[in-house]
Image (cartoon, helix red, strand yellow):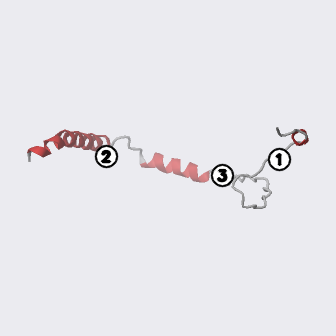
Amino acid sequence: MEILLWLVPSLVVLVAAMTWAGWVGREGRGEVDRDVAAERLGRALAKDHTPRRHVAPERVRDRSTGIAVRPTQRDVSDSTRRVS
C-alpha cells in the first residue's frame, strides 16, 4: 500500500484540474440570448457561399523508367566538359 503513495500528487492535480474545468464550463457563462443567436444564424445563412474553385494547370506526367532518382536535364555547356 505504501508503494502507491507516489500516485497521490498526480491524483491531487487531477482532481484540481477536474474541479477547475467544471467551474469554467458551468452553465450560464457567456450565454447568448436566443434572439441574438437566431439573428446571427439568419445572417450567416443569408450570405452567398459559392465555392471558389482554383483550376491548376494540367501536369505533364513523366514516363516511368524504374529509376529511383531521375537524371537532371543538362545544359549544352555541360556536355562540352571533359571528365577527368
Q: Which mark is residue 27?
A: 2
**Between marks 2 and 3, how big is the CA–CA gap?**
34 Å
Residue 75 vs residue 58: left or right?
right
**Between marks 2 and 1, how big is the CA–CA gap?**
66 Å
Q: Residue 27 in the image: x percent, y percent?
A: 31, 46
Q: CB of mark 2 within 8 Å of CB of mark 3?
A: no
Quarter of the image where one finds residue 7? top left
Q: Residues within 10 Å of mark 1 (few under 14, many from 20)?
A: few
On the image, numbered disc 1 is attached to which residue? 73
**Between marks 1 and 3, how big is the CA–CA gap?**
48 Å
Q: CB of mark 2 within 8 Å of CB of mark 1?
A: no
Nearest the eye: 28 or 62: 62
Quarter of the image where one finds residue 58? bottom right
Query: Which three-letter amino acid code belongs to the residue tagged 1?
Result: Gln
Q: Earlier in the sequence, mark 2 or mark 3?
A: 2
Residue 51 vs residue 17: left or right?
right
On the image, numbered disc 3 is attached to which residue? 48
Q: Residue 31 in the image: x percent, y percent?
A: 38, 43
The structure residue drawn at horizontal position 58% and vertical position 53%, both measured from the top left corner, is 45
Q: Residues within 10 Å of mark 3 (few under 14, many from 20)?
A: few
Residue 46 vs residue 41: left or right?
right
Q: CB of mark 1 within 8 Å of CB of mark 3?
A: no
Residue 44 vs residue 3: left or right?
right
The residue most toward the front is 84
On screen, residue 16 above or below 68: above
Query: Which three-letter amino acid code belongs to the residue tagged 2?
Result: Glu
The residue most toward the left is 1
Q: Residue 66 in the image: x percent, y percent?
A: 72, 61
